[in-house]
Amino acid sequence: MPNKLALIGIRYDENSSFTKGAADAPPQIRAALRSDAWNLFSENGTDLSEDSTFFDAGDIEPVAGSDMFTHIENTVHTLIADGLLPISLGGDHSITYPIVRAFARKYNDLSILHFDAHPDLYDNYQGNRNSHASPFARIMERKLVKRLVQVGIRTFNTHQREQVKKFGVETIEMHQLRDNLQLVFDSPVYISFDIDALDPAFAPGVSHREPGGMSTRQAIDLIQRMKGKVVGADIVEFNPRMDPLHITGTVCAKLLKEIAARMIA
């Protein structure tokens, strides 16, 4: 099998509003993925252990005097241009905006499936338009995607509900989620998975814990049941400093396996 998937770490959390630590996540997720505690088969039987399955593109880190968002966009675009399907390991959620800019250079009909406790649609947060609470406002105002579907939201305020209406975002709030939900997409899909979409009982290692979220099983089932071609993904907002028992890193690696299997199915 030729290289199809590109793993890239984005060690950046400068737009985190509450506490830092998400920049430490990429090596922790890689270590969990390669742990001898389990194998690299996904639940649908895809063997992800072949050397040709993943191309590890290393990490992007801030460089003094350079624009991090431009660096992220150009690096991801190069991977796409080389025929690879990037999976980005964050990092805070602000990285999704430049990543999607890269994808939009190839796909003019991209859809996003966004898992999160928060809609991340603030026009700005605490005066920062590039906040990790604002990436989808930037994406939607630039019309980078055809469709944005958000699942697991449980923190809406008035401003963000106004943003949903303004941009035509499809939201499935946590209290609306049903186990038989099947999402259908008729264009290429990018999955953006903020790990705090999960209930803190399943993923405590996040900066913004929000009870009442999805189980790991519910999230995996949604990914497995969805209809559409997944062309890229990110897993963001894992904060190893908040994960002393190393539970959340393992959950991130599990989600990575299941998303990867969908991408090369």
Image (cartoon, rainbow, N blue to C red):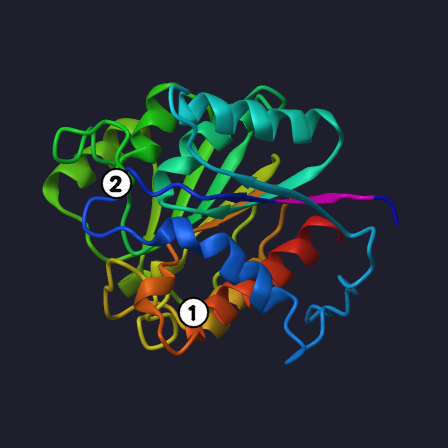
Image x and y of residue 164, in percent: 26, 36
Assess whether mark 2 and mark 1 are in contact (beta carbons under 8 angstroms): no
- 23 sits to left or right of 213: right
Q: Residue at x 43, y 28 (%)?
A: 63
Q: Is residue 241 visible?
A: yes
Q: Which residue is mark 2?
A: 133
- Secondary structure state at the residue bearing disc 2: loop
Which numbered marker is on residue 248?
A: 1
Image x and y of residue 16, in percent: 26, 44
Judged by its main secondary structure, the magenta piece is: strand
Q: 254 or 108: nearer the eye? A: 254
State the extent of the magenta-drawn residues as a range: 3-7
- Secondary structure state at the residue bearing disc 1: helix
Disc 1 to disc 2, C-alpha distance: 21 Å
- Category of crowding for the residue at label 2, using alpha-carbon neighbours closer than 10 angstroms: few (below 14), some (14–19), many (at least 20): many
Above or below, 207 relative to 6: below
Q: Residue at x 39, y 48 (%)?
A: 23
